[in-house]
Image: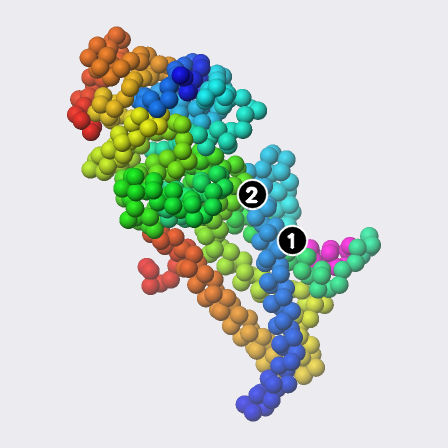
């Protein structure tokens, strides 16, 4: 059954056309990876899905409800869509625990005690129980991003959008974040913009290759890596594979 | 001479303490009311619609573009001609609060804008509405950032509350003027008053610094005055 439907999305900033008609669907608990050159609109697409940047044209549906409809309660719908940012965007003035619990407290109106308990479970899940009392400025980049993932998970989302979650990390910290993401596979739907080809190859149910604001080609990792139909896809994968390596773990 | 000054100081004390009471009353009430007003104006400037933003800019420019003294004269001497009459204390409180609100609005606006935009994105992505995001994510950070500027505003207000003496509020400076006019000991009286202001300023700065340290975010450090020791 289709959980997310993205239908013919267009988005421009001034005269610059970023997205030129993007459509795809996602099923429950599916993992899809979006790859493509910089400036192709991958991040913009994610922001169009959760309406941080509403699209100019096109629709987004989540579980049969149209997110792009101005009459929809966007705050209610966003509870169901987690977002993990490239530069983490943890709340600087809150401990790791409260970063995870604040959505439960203020949005879901869950009692403080229960919210802390749930937040602690999520921090444990990402391997950061010991850092619960630390503030973002006291955490490493990899730890920050895992708190970011825990923050998204705590809301029990149907879908988590990952916007280049490892791009701002030192190479030796990327593995921990990717491991956490892999552990979520099949438990929650994930739409991941990344250059980590290892992750794309080993974890994704489908890879979407975007360029120039459109989807050039999409398919299973096996098809895409060994038998891509479009020359442009093969060229990009060849180049990025040489650059980032397509080994396990990226 | 010294014994004489001691006696003079004791004789003046009741008046000075009464004046000090009014000075503190003026300062604390106007800083508090001005703070609430400042937050509303600053939020209106940053997040308001064009109309709201325009209104806030208009208010802030009007207040900052005219002398406090003229504002006090309009409130105390001007408004009665159209039937609105305030006591001196009321007029001074209104004038100082309205004035301080405009200045605090600008300090707060700067702090709000210095909170990274990603913080708002993250809050909205969790499902918080705009108001919740501002309240739980933006303001707690912006207010911490604004403490040093706010500390200046507090000291400014503490000292400039003396201007209220011109509309006959018997605050500290007015009491000094009263004592001096009766004793002709201007130097001693105003030296005493200067020392009182100085002590008030040093104590309040120290208190605000301690508050800033206590509220500082671990790993980032307190937003406080730069001391030579940190250089």
Give x and y (percent) for residue B199: 51, 72
Image disc number at residue B98 = 1
Label 2 secondary element: helix
Which is the main secondary structure of the residues drawn in magenta? helix
Q: Which residue is mark 2?
A: B43
- In the displayed structure, B52 sits above or below B16; it is above
Is B212 in front, or is B88? B212
* As drawn, B218 above or below A3: below
The answer to whether any part of residue A32 appears in the image is: yes
Please state the extent of the stretch shown in magenta in the rendering. B67-79
- Marks 2 and 1, how far apart at CA: 16 Å
Residue at figure coordinates x 42%, y 45% from the top left: A114
Instruction: Determine if the magenta segment contains residue B78.
Output: yes
Q: Vertically, is B90 above or below A154?
A: below
Numbered-mark total? 2
State whether residue B60 is above or below residue A77: below
Camera-side residue of B65 and A62: A62
A126 and A54: which is toward the camera: A126
* Chain of residue at mark 1: B
Do we see residue A37 in this rendering? Answer: no
Colouring used for the render: rainbow
């Amino acid at each position: 059954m289709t959980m997310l439907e993205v239908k013919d999305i267009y988005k421009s900033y001034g005269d610059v056309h970023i997205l030129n008609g993007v459509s795809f669907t996602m099923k429950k608990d599916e993992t899809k990876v979006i790859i493509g050159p910089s400036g192709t609109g991958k991040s913009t697409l994610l922001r169009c899905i959760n309406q941080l940047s509403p699209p100019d044209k096109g629709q987004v549906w989540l579980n049969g409800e149209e997110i792009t409809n101005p009459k929809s309660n966007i705050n209610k719908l966003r509870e169901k869509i987690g977002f993990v940012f490239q530069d983490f965007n943890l709340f600087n003035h809150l401990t790791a625990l409260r970063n995870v619990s604040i959505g439960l407290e203020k949005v879901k109106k869950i009692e403080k005690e229960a919210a802390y308990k749930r937040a602690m479970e999520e921090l444990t899940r990402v391997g950061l129980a010991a850092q619960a009392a630390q503030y973002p400025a006291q955490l490493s980049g990899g730890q920050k991003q895992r708190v970011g993932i825990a923050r998204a998970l705590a809301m029990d989302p149907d879908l988590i959008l990952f916007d280049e979650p490892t791009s701002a990390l030192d190479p030796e910290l990327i593995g921990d974040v990717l491991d956490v993401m892999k552990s979520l596979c099949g438990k929650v739907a994930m739409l991941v913009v990344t250059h980590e080809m290892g992750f794309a190859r080993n974890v994704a149910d489908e890879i979407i290759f975007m360029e120039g604001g459109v989807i050039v080609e999409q398919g299973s990792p096996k098809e895409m890596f060994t038998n891509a139909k479009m020359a442009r896809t093969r060229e990009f994968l060849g180049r990025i594979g040489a650059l980032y390596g397509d080994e396990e773990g990226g | 001479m010294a014994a004489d000054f001691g006696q003079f100081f004791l004789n003046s004390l009741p008046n000075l303490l009464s004046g000090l009471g009014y000075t503190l009353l003026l300062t604390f009430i106007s800083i508090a009311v001005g703070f609430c007003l400042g937050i509303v104006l600053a939020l209106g400037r940053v997040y308001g619609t064009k109309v709201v933003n325009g209104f806030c800019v208009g208010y802030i420019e009007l207040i900052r573009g005219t002398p406090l003294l003229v504002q006090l004269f309009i409130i105390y001497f001007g408004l009665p001609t159209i039937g609105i009459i305030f006591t001196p204390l009321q007029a001074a409180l209104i004038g100082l609060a309205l004035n301080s609100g405009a200045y605090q609005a600008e300090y707060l606006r700067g702090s709000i804008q210095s909170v990274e935009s990603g913080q708002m994105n993250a809050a909205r992505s969790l499902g918080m509405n705009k108001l919740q995001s501002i309240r739980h994510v933006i303001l707690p950070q912006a207010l911490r950032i604004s403490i040093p500027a706010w500390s200046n505003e507090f000291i400014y207000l503490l000292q400039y509350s003396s201007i209220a003496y011109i509309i006959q509020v018997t605050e500290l400076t007015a009491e000094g003027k009263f004592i001096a006019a009766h004793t002709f000991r201007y130097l001693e009286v105003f030296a005493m008053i200067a020392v009182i202001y100085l002590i008030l300023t040093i104590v309040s700065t120290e208190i605000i610094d301690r508050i800033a340290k206590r509220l500082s975010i671990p790993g980032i450090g307190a937003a406080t005055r730069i001391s030579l020791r940190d250089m």
